[in-house]
Image (cartoon, helix red, strand yellow):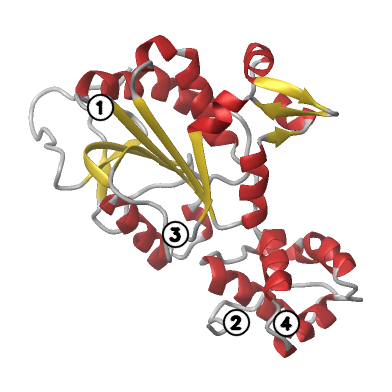
Amino acid sequence: MRLMTSSPPIPTGRLNQGAARLLSGLLEARTGQTLSEGRAWRMETALRPVLRDHDLVDMDSLAATLLRNSDAPLEAAVIDALLNNESSFFRDLQIFDMIARQILPHVHTDRQDRTLRIWSAGCSTGQEAYSLAIQLRNDWSRWNGWRIEILATDVSGAAIDQARAGIFSQMDVQRGLAIGDLIKWFEPHGDDWRASPELRRMIDFRQDNLFDPAVPTGEYDLLLCRNVLLYFTPERRQVVLSLLARRSHAKSVLLLGAGETVIGQGGDFIAHPEFRGGYARQGLLPIPTAGPTRRAG
């Protein structure tokens, strides 16, 4: 696979333009993500630990090393450093409120096989998946006896390793996690906190690439791909939405980030008629064309 792509030049300060294009091209080639101008300006800061760990003096030497050698560990370290692994517990609380109050009860009432399948795509360090597990455990009388499958995937191996370990700093748990849930579902781990075995057993964390997926199989009742599409070109967004559509059934619900939409991104999904902010698979769910508009919640 070529490292260089057709990405536009990246504005930098001291960083050589050729090195910048190679590093941003590596990210795009391996993950599909393009570096926005804001992220490109922080490239040197993000990669400083990589330079230190691999005894490299500057960005140009990093680029030269990548050109000379096929160094998989170094490539992986560069990609992990350039990815934006921003996440928090119960991020966009109104979304999780809708999941708890509307979407999950709907699935519980509708499904006869007592199986719930959820896919958190682009899960980063796992806070979204753990938030879903907490919601389910807090309403366990409803779900006891069900087979619960939560798949959480991300292209970053480092992020998946952290998510699987379930260890979060004090600052992490203070971002969105209620004190009652912290005490109930987490254990002290030195200066940090670790998710309980009950939560960790509920989630299957896997490293996977949305453009070359190996893990997602079958269909999912709830699909979350939030704050992921915004890093892709319009063409790549359509590829991801097509994958999500293939993993959806007639009553699945897709949730995207607050600044993301399916409008103009192909015809795989349409606005869900029941759940505001959710999307339904086009052509599978009958959408009323007349009569009063039904508002969710």
Q: Mark 2: which secondary structure?
A: loop
* Residue at 15 percent of width and 43 percent of height: 284
The amino acid type found where label 2 is placed reads Leu
* CB within 8 Å, label 3 to label 2: no
**Disc nearest the viewer among 1 and 2:** 2
Which residue bears the numbered disc 1? 274
The front one of 18 and 293 is: 18
Residue 225: mark: none
Q: What distance separates the C-alpha of mark 3 from that of mark 1?
A: 28 Å
Q: What distance separates the C-alpha of mark 1 from that of mark 4?
A: 50 Å
Count neighbours of disc 1 (C-alpha within 10 A) and say few if under 14, some if 14 to 19, many if 20 or more. some
Q: Earlier in the sequence, mark 4 or mark 3?
A: 4
Which residue bears the numbered disc 4? 66
Q: Earlier in the sequence, mark 3 or mark 1?
A: 3
Q: Mark 4: which secondary structure?
A: helix
The amino acid type found where label 1 is placed reads Glu
Q: Earlier in the sequence, mark 1 or mark 2?
A: 2
Residue 3: mark: 2
The front one of 47 and 158 is: 158
Which residue bears the numbered disc 3? 210
